[in-house]
Image: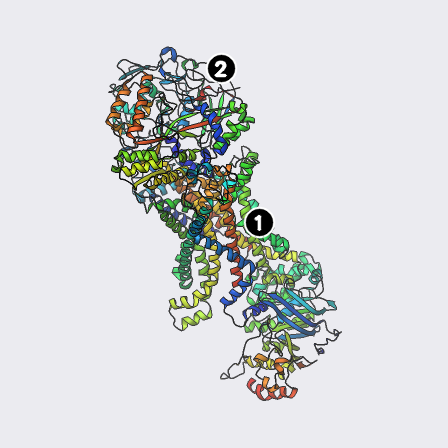
Amino acid sequence: MDGGPEPDTNTGTVKVEGRSPGQLMWIRFKRDRTGVISAFVVAFFFLVAAAAPLISKLYGKDPYTIYADVRPELFDSAGVPVQPNGGISSEFWFGLEPGNGYDVFTKLIYGIRTSLMISLAVTVAVVLTGILLGVTAGYLGGKTDFFIGRLIDFLLAFPSQLFFIASMPVVVSLFVSPRDQTPTYVRVVALIAVQWVLGWMSLARILRGTTLALREREFIEAAKVSGASPWRIIRREILPNVVTPLLVQTTYTLPYLVTGEAGLSFLGVGIVEPTPDWGQMFSKASTELVLQNDITYMFFPGVSMVVFIVAFNLLGDSVRDAFDPKTAR
Amino acid sequence: MTTLTKDAGTPAPADAGAFLSVRDLHVSFKTEDGVVRAVDGLSFDVERGKTLGIVGESGSGKSVTNLTILGLHNPQFTTVEGEILLDGQELITARESELEKVRGNKAAMIFQDPLTALSPYYTVGRQIAEPFMKHRGASKRAAWDRAVEMLAKVGIPNPKERAKDYPHQFSGGMRQRAMIAMALVCDPDLLIADEPTTALDVTVQAQILDLLKDLQQEFGSGIIFITHDLGVIADMADDIMVMYAGSAVERGTTNEVLRAPQHPYTWGLLNSMPRLDSDLGMPLNPIPGAPPSLLTPPSGCRFHPRCTFQDRVGGTRCVTERPLLAPDRASACHLTADQKRTIFLEEIKPRLA
Amino acid sequence: MSRGGRRTYAALSIFAAGALVLSGCSKGGSNASDNNKKDQQNAKRQQASIKFGGAADSTGPAAAVPGAKTGGTLEVLQRDSYAHLDPGQIYVSDEGSLATLIHRGLTGYKATNNKGSGHEVVGDLATDSGTTTDGGKTWKYTLKDGIKFSDGTPITSADFRQTFERLFASFINQGPTYLQQWMADTNGADYRKLLPDGPYKGKHLPNSILETPDSKTVIFHFKTPHPDLPYALAMAGYAVVSKKGDTKEKYDKAPVTTGPYKIQSFKSGKSMVLVKNPNWDPKTDPIRNQYVDQMDFSFNVQYEDSTKALLADTGADQTGISFNNSVDAGNISAVLGGDAAVKARTVAGYQPYVGQININQSHAALQDKTVREAIAYALPITPIIRAFGGSSAAEVAGGYISPTVSGYDASFDPWGKKKNPGGDAAKAKALLKKAGKLGLKLTYGYQNTPEGQQYSTAIAAALKNAGFNVQRQDIPAETYYDQVGKIDNNYDIYASAWGADWPSASTVIPPLFDGRAIADGSPNYSHVNDAKVNADIDAANKISDPVKSAAAWEKIDQYLVKDVINAVPTIDYKQVQIAGSKVGGLVYDDVIGGIDPRRLYIK
Amino acid sequence: MLRFLVRRILGAVVILFLLSIVTFLLFFGMPRDPALLMCGKTCNPTSLANIHHVLGLDKSIPEQYWIFLHNLILGSNQFAQGPCPAPCFGYSYHTNDPVWATMMDRLPTTVSLTLGAAVVFLIVGLGTGMVAAWKRGTLLDKTVTAGSMVISSMQIYFLGPLALAVLVYQSHLFDKPAYNNFTANPVTWFSGLIIPWVVLSTIFASQYTRMARSSMIEQLQEEHVRTARAKGMSRRYVFFRYAWRGSLIPIITIFGIDLGTLLGGAIITEYTFGLPGLGRLAVESVQFSDLPLLLGVMLFSASMILLCNLIVDAAYAFIDPRVRLA
């Protein structure tokens, strides 16, 4: 609020019968309709992802059946569904994928499942690393801080996408098994690894900053004077106070990682056919086959992802505002 | 001597002598958590050449009041009722363009933290010159010279050069001087100083206060001096208004209020104020409890949750009935006049040493 | 020729062309299927048998193309830039097309009709297709008079010695190896031992192998008869290289040429300009014409782009063409279903390639014939056709011999794939049970391209239905053939494709199935070593009459497919090409496996 | 200023040095042998060894790295393909073209794509963002905010193919994106890049709109802005003179990063539209395990990022007098 009398707003909010920041945040959040709705949307996606096997069981199909061979009458010789709109029908709700003719509906929910699984894993890894290095650097300062700082600078100078592409085959080849199929989990692990390595810096930076600021604050000083061990101070004094930036950052990180993962699979270095994956669907959607004959197909991964990302970003904003009502909206 | 207004309930017509008169001001704004009634029925006047000190804890509505006078509140979230007459001009209903003509011209403001209050992107000289160009329609050149002159007035050494500097190149005290120069560049009739010295260390504080006094002599402008520090007010203000939870609880001349305070809150303030002459054994005793939420103000006397003298009033009056602020020298409290006197003389004064 | 080129291109385009990688294989479109018939008629014509021409046939100039005019500039739109211009490095189809314009060898193919189906091998730089007195052990060639390089220096036998000797140097590693192997009388890559550094360190081939008694005579001496030499020498890979101008590695970017056109400028990956070669004398050339003044090539033009441009037929595109881009499947219906005017601008035909799924004989379990039969029955062809763009880009193959090679038998279809391209899982399962190998583990190495991923998954699924335990293994596209070319590779089955280097199955059956040639990198990908096959190959190789030999090869082919089952034929590759309305002399040449650049003129 | 430059450039060099080492090691972890590519069909151990020797792959990794550095700084004449003046990244294993030339050849595509888009999205983004901030709380503001939120959540790999499908394949309104040399023909240059520009800048513009808006609003809450209003400065004056300047700082930071990344190769965009830029070159080099090319592009992209960071920091000094370059 430009020129708005800040101090009073504070007293207004902070003094609501001594509720804990957490409760306050929760109260404000519940009051924020967009926030709640987007929270539900996001939750829905995770639910779908989690329940994908169940859903497809009820729906009676799986994302691996090659309908182009099982039901050849539905396709032409190039594998394009003969019915309009990519063969959408009461039987195949979202139609069939041009090419091998997978069932788009199940492929989509399984694809979401894969993508979210991976991104979630990366997020966790990134957050942990971020906290570890960020807080350490901020708290210890000095040489450690310098070293970690330089490391961050260095990694930030990396052309990350390029690095991903270059390192994926390498990482995958670390698990080569001569006679057996390269298991999907290997690619998954590789994806998680590369994204993690170049993913944690920004969070670490922010946490470093916060910690640095906190370190100067009286209560930390007090704790120091009272002879509490650094570990204890970090655990009891610092961590609780970095929760806010942490939570906010994380809600922004996850969607970013989802799109990143999808990007890699889109470029063909991530998850590949037949494993269903959001990004892999995009790479399918960008083939001549689809562009020429079946635009319908690309809307399913496309729209679903846009909805997911929007919801998640909105959620992020609400979380931020809930924590800190002063920030501009 | 400043004439003090009649009862807030029935505001008297604006005093002819008064340059600024505020009548029954209500300011409230919406926040995430509900409507905050920041100012709740406030009335006062300021005369040219005189200084009104407004005292109170942060959140008592001091700053809001004065931002409202210049219309610096955010209309989107804020609703203002009552009337503000500046030199006969109604400000609450005035259009933005009108207000712009007033701001920095008839009425100027000095803010608490000169570091954040000055733009880091422009030279001090330019920032001082700007309002002069705007209000006096002066040329760049003239305005710049004026800026240098003002800097000299507020005692910046080698102003010609310093004018070219950026705020971050100034020391805290110099910044505040620059602020003052900026406020006075169009010699305004009203100067609102919002805790101008809190951010400064004691010695600089003194200098700044002196400077203000001198300049007041020279420009003869009325000053509203906001602070939570009674010590400062003592040697600045002619009159004092004590604010609590958005309304005035006591008012009178500086002498009256400081020598014979009548409101428990004022006592509390005096009590909690450290004194140079107090012997070391003497503990500071802050007012118990915290300022009330303006979202859900306490019933009856806003101060009753923290008031240690409720029982003297007896019954539930303090909780149910809101005490009014009597005309002239007065305080909004249910205690009887002699109760107030005796309590102060017998219980408070001794502790003030 | 092996599909070495294509695989690299596939790899290149995986990432390079990105979204557009499937250019070759997008909408066969539901409406493409009816065009399919026309298309097949268009493409179904068999290569008449080829004879070796004598001096009379070998004298220039070449027969004029009816209605041809000279002059004008031809716009050539190509997807892939030319990676190699050094004759010794040229093997892949599109460089082959280019070579017909700029490089000349001792022999070449002369069209005997204007349909692109009739050819005979004649002397190109030599006075005839070669003379042998001892059934193919010794071959004598005499150079024509007045043959010059584009830089004006006359071509002598010394240049040919250089040409053939440098083939042994290690930097020549992309071209054909028949001649080298015949000279060294070995298989695989051992031939290099004959002259490890090529001619560059002062060593030369002894007269007992290559003899150049005078400046006009080149004589080959082989230990075993090679009646196919005239064919072999007609390959671009054996075109002449200037001794004076031989810059080794650098020659690959700036060769000294001999054809009717010379390279004015070449920007790798961007553009190339060919202009008339003043030192080319039509009287010495029985094969090529020189109608257009200039050819402007632009590269990185994807299939659908060239098609769209040529279909639109405006401005420069009216005189536009693509030697090697096919009509992209997305527009195939527009082209084939289009009006007569458009159809008149299109040509269609088979490419000399035949796809197959190899079954690795080196793995014990697969030496059980019943298992291989099971695989043969189970294997679905539809996924492959689908992946390559549907019926207009490929059709079910019966044997290993393509329709462009003499001896092709359209009715041959031992596994009933033509009737039931989806494969016969039930029958396969029964066989597998009979062999007691239900659940047999099959490691399936596939080329890691979008197409590869697509059809390999489908094939794997079908094989699973038939009771195999399939393990898919992705192989980096650009080294795919090197991987599966290893004898001790890890894979049980893997796809490969092979095209005749010349229109005789002698360039298909022996390289693919001669058990004695098994070596790392040899195209005998399934490592079959069958005494009968070997014997028959030797027999067939000795037959000098093309027609008889064709029949003999087809017999071996059928035996291999039906009884040896070391691999399963999958598809015959087809393509449709289109040119601008002002381009004349448009012919689909079966030997080149695409449009014949030598006959083109501007109307 | 000079000290600042020197310090930053030295830092950049160090980072590039480390980066090159990492890339080098990464490469040698690659699952396949680049020699196989050049070895061709007639590949046998001897010829493979031979090629290893020619490529110097038979030397120890540190030795190879040393040679690389040496050539990079001093150039080299050791290459069979010809002389290679500094900065010498050697010759591509795959095409045998000099790496530096190849990169310079691909650069124009990436630069045209990036700068063209950057101009658009910066202007549009900042413009709409400021308008939204100025009209804060109005319907316009709300629509802008919502719209930019949705668009910025779209991905190039969705919007790109969508645009292609609709504008090129279905309606045939545009030609397929392609890079044509500007000097050769500005018109085709423009028409060839229009779709990529639009797609790229749509997404980025929406992000910059959001940034500009929130950054502006934050600035408007600054005390010095309030002071300016207390001086009687008009709202417009305060908005453009006081708030705007401060609001640029975070935006410039992000812009620096974005520009750097894009100039280093707009991989997904070039991939989606099949533009022969640096990004695509990079991907190819990985595909063909083409070390010289890979190193070249890696270092080039990194330098771009570093360069842009440096420019950004310099820009701070211009905007904010408090920042001193040292």
Residue C81, given in percent of the width and then of the height, sits at 44, 31
Between residue D202 and residue C244, name the one nearer to us. Answer: D202
Name the amino acid, label 2.
Pro
Between residue C94 and residue A8, name the one nearer to us. Answer: C94
Identify the residue shown where x is 41% and y is 22%: C590
Q: Which-is-in-front pick, marks 2 and 1?
A: 2
Work out how far the residue at label 2 is from the one at label 1, CA to CA, in angstroms: 63 Å
Quarter of the image with the N terminus of chain C is: top left
The answer to whether residue B126 is seen in the rendering is: yes
Residue D100, given in percent of the width and then of the height, sits at 42, 38
Q: Which residue is mark 2?
A: C66
**Dot 1 surroundings within 10 Å: few (below 14), some, or many (20 or more)?**
many
Identify the residue shown where x is 42% and y is 30%: C394
Name the amino acid, label 1.
Gly
The answer to whether residue A198 is seen in the rendering is: no
**Mark 1 secondary-structure assignment:** helix
Whether residue C279 sits left or right of residue C544 in the image: it is right
- Image coloring type: rainbow
